[in-house]
């Protein structure tokens, strides 16, 4: 009898601890109806469920605006390294979403197109992630999109190392 009571107590304590850990995402899910599934510590969702009646918003791919106007046009120096370009691209996306009364928390899908840095001949995935994690998976903005990152031969602007396109969702009105 005592073992049964102890098991129920431990189960209840575990459930409470799990609920406390997940309270914020679950509250957001209940409010919007959008369910995000994630595994492990990597800051992306593995899948997202969007309820019927939600509006889907597709934003065109965006690269960074010029960071250094004194540099040659369409050069790497004009736009910066991968981390700088990712941050600037995400800032542009955030501004476009704001015009639509949306936030980065409404992003459900992201495609990142990356070009190898011509100086190193390598993709700077770590630099991209440093900028990305300033917007996603934070205490202020815990919503994680599903995401794919692609290595491509080149982008339309020869100074770009990165271009990002996103899909956002406006939850249905209740």
Image: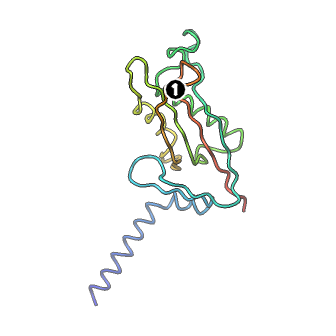
- In the picture shown, does residue 12 fall above or below 85? below
Colour scheme employed for the rendering of this structure: rainbow
- Residue 106 appears at what percent x and percent y? 61, 48
Q: Secondary structure at mark 1?
A: helix
- Residue 159 appears at what percent x and percent y? 53, 18
* Quarter the N terminus occupies: bottom left
Residue 126 shown left or right of residue 78 in the figure = left
Callout 1 crowding tier (Cα within 10 Å): few <14, some 14–19, many ≥20: many
- In the picture shown, does residue 81 fall above or below 134? above
- In the picture shown, does residue 80 fall above or below 56? above
User: Front-most of 85 and 110?
Assistant: 110
Residue pictured at 31% horizontal, 80% vertical: 7
Residue lying farthest bottom?
A: 1
User: Front-most of 31 and 93?
Assistant: 93
Q: Quadrant of residue 48?
A: bottom right
* Quarter the C terminus occupies: bottom right
Residue pictured at 62% horizontal, 37% vertical: 94
- Residue 92 appears at what percent x and percent y? 62, 31
Residue pictured at 59% horizontal, 43% vertical: 104
Number of marks in the image?
1
Residue at which label 1 appears: 85
Residue lying farthest front?
A: 153
User: Front-most of 24 and 121?
Assistant: 121
Q: Quadrant of residue 61?
A: top right
- Residue 28 appears at what percent x and percent y? 57, 58
Residue 137 shown left or right of residue 30 in the figure = left
């Amino acid at each position: 009898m005592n073992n049964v009571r102890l098991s129920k107590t431990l189960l209840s304590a575990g459930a409470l601890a799990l609920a406390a850990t997940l309270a914020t995402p679950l509250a957001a899910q209940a409010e919007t109806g959008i369910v995000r599934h994630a595994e492990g510590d990597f800051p992306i969702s593995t899948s997202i469920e969007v309820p019927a009646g939600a509006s889907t918003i597709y934003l065109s791919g965006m690269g960074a605006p010029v960071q250094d106007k004194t540099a040659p046009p369409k050069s790497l120096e004009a736009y910066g390294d991968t981390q700088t370009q990712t941050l600037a691209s995400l800032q542009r996306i955030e501004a476009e979403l704001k015009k639509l009364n949306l936030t980065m928390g409404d992003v459900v899908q992201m495609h990142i197109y990356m070009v190898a840095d011509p100086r190193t001949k390598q993709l700077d995935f770590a630099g991209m992630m440093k900028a990305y994690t300033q917007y996603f998976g934070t205490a202020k903005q815990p919503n994680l999109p599903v995401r794919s990152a692609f290595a491509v031969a080149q982008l339309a602007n020869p100074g770009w190392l990165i271009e990002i396109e996103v899909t956002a969702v406006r939850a249905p009105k209740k």
